[in-house]
């Protein structure tokens, strides 16, 4: 099974990027073809053999990754699966790629693998990095309903069948949009605790646009993918959860601004999931109302 890797960078972490590339090159088995996308920034000096694409403007996380996919041909057709890795991450285990190959080869219905992210200094996994509601034990692997954007592997047949990441999202929830479309097409998603990416512990709110994008894209996600009766339920639950978490007044103001924007702006094509997919998500432990 042939693997490729897509890494997007803003050009501001050259040392971390080089360490990541070294960890990819050190993987057991066949060589992994790599493309690094400079997302509105020049690409720093890289090892020989690494493909590069420099974009004149920042297209956001999904837009940059989509460019990386197409660097491997339409929908990444030159390879069987693509690893998507954050440029400040690191693969500490040489056998990660082989585990990915075996997982896809042994389960033809497996579409996406999501890795366990751990802090390199403490070894801890943040709760938000376990993509299920029962997240207390990050060492337990399971079937899940979404995946982590900078630590995953996607079978390229999935991209060919359901399409790429939603570029208009720019940042936040683009993985869940792709995950729901993949599940609706019959693919499965596995969280694998034995597939590890080292990544420093961070807070998503470090991004200035975090609260607005999270709210706007949550509305877009529902409008694009959910059956009409579930849209108000899903968004109502997330409105209540946001208020319970008591964000700061500026953060709450940004959140409500994004929420309004999600209703007043185009969200892209609407393809509501089948009701049997709703039931499948429910059986997997995460009904699409939360």
Image (cartoon, rainbow, N blue to C red):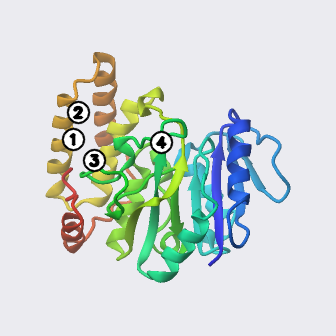
According to the picture, the residue beneath numbered tag 2 turns out to be: 242
74 lies above or below 137: below
Marked residue nearer the N-terminal end (4 or 1): 4
* Residue at 33 percent of width and 23 percent of height: 251
* Quadrant of the rendered image containing residue 265: top left
* Quadrant of the rendered image containing residue 13: top right
Q: Rounded to the nearest whole Å, what is the CA distance between mark 2 and mark 4?
A: 29 Å
* Quadrant of the rendered image containing residue 67: bottom right
Label 2 secondary element:
helix
Marked residue nearer the N-terminal end (2 or 4): 4
* Residue at 36 percent of width and 75 percent of height: 185
According to the picture, the residue beneath numbered tag 4 turns out to be: 123
Marked residue nearer the N-terminal end (4 or 3): 4
The quarter in which the N terminus is drawn is bottom right
Q: Position of residue 14 (x, y in %)?
A: 73, 37
Question: Would residue 35 appear left or right of 99 to someone viewing this image?
Answer: right
Q: Rounded to the nearest whole Å, what is the CA distance between mark 2 and mark 1?
A: 6 Å
Question: CB atoms at circles 2 and 1 under 8 Å apart?
Answer: yes
Q: Nearer the viewer, mark 4 or mark 1?
A: 4
For label 2, the crowd category at 10 Å Cα-Cα, with few meaning under 14, some 14 to 19 and many 20 or more, is some
Q: Position of residue 158 (x, y in %)?
A: 48, 72
According to the picture, the residue beneath numbered tag 3 turns out to be: 136
Asked whether 179 or 271 is in front, the reply is 179
* Residue at 43 percent of width and 51 percent of height: 174
Label 3 secondary element:
loop
Q: Is residue 255 visible?
A: yes
Asked whether 237 or 47 is in front, the reply is 47
Q: Rounded to the nearest whole Å, what is the CA distance between mark 1 and mark 3?
A: 21 Å
According to the picture, the residue beneath numbered tag 1 turns out to be: 238
Question: CB atoms at circles 2 and 3 under 8 Å apart?
Answer: no
Q: Rounded to the nearest whole Å, what is the CA distance between mark 4 and mark 3?
A: 15 Å
């Amino acid at each position: 099974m042939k693997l490729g890797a897509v890494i997007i960078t803003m050009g501001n972490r050259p040392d971390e990027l080089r360490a990541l590339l070294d960890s990819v090159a050190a993987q057991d088995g066949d060589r992994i073809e790599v493309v690094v996308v400079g997302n509105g920034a020049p690409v720093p000096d890289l090892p020989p053999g690494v493909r590069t694409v420099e974009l004149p403007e920042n297209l956001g996380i999904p837009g940059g990754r989509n460019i990386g996919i197409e660097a491997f041909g339409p929908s990444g057709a030159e390879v069987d699966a693509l690893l998507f890795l954050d440029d400040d991450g690191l693969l500490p285990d040489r056998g990660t790629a082989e585990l990915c190959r075996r997982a896809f080869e042994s389960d033809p219905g497996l579409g996406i693998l999501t890795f366990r992210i751990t802090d390199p200094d403490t070894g801890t996994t943040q709760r938000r990095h376990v993509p299920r509601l029962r997240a207390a034990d990050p060492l337990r692997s399971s079937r899940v309903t979404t995946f982590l954007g900078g630590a995953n592997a996607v079978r390229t047949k999935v991209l060919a069948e359901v399409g790429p990441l939603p570029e208009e999202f720019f940042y936040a929830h683009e993985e869940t949009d792709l995950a729901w479309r993949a599940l609706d097409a019959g693919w499965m998603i596995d969280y694998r605790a034995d597939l590890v990416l080292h990544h420093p512990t961070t807070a998503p709110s470090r991004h200035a646009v975090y609260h607005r994008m999270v709210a706007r894209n949550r509305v877009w996600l529902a409008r694009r993918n959910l059956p009409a009766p579930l849209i108000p339920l899903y968004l109502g639950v997330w409105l209540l959860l946001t208020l319970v978490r008591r964000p700061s007044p500026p953060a709450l103001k940004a959140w409500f601004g994004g929420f309004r924007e999600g209703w007043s702006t185009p969200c892209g094509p609407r393809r509501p999931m089948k009701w049997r997919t709703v039931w499948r998500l429910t059986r997997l432990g995460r009904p699409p109302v939360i």
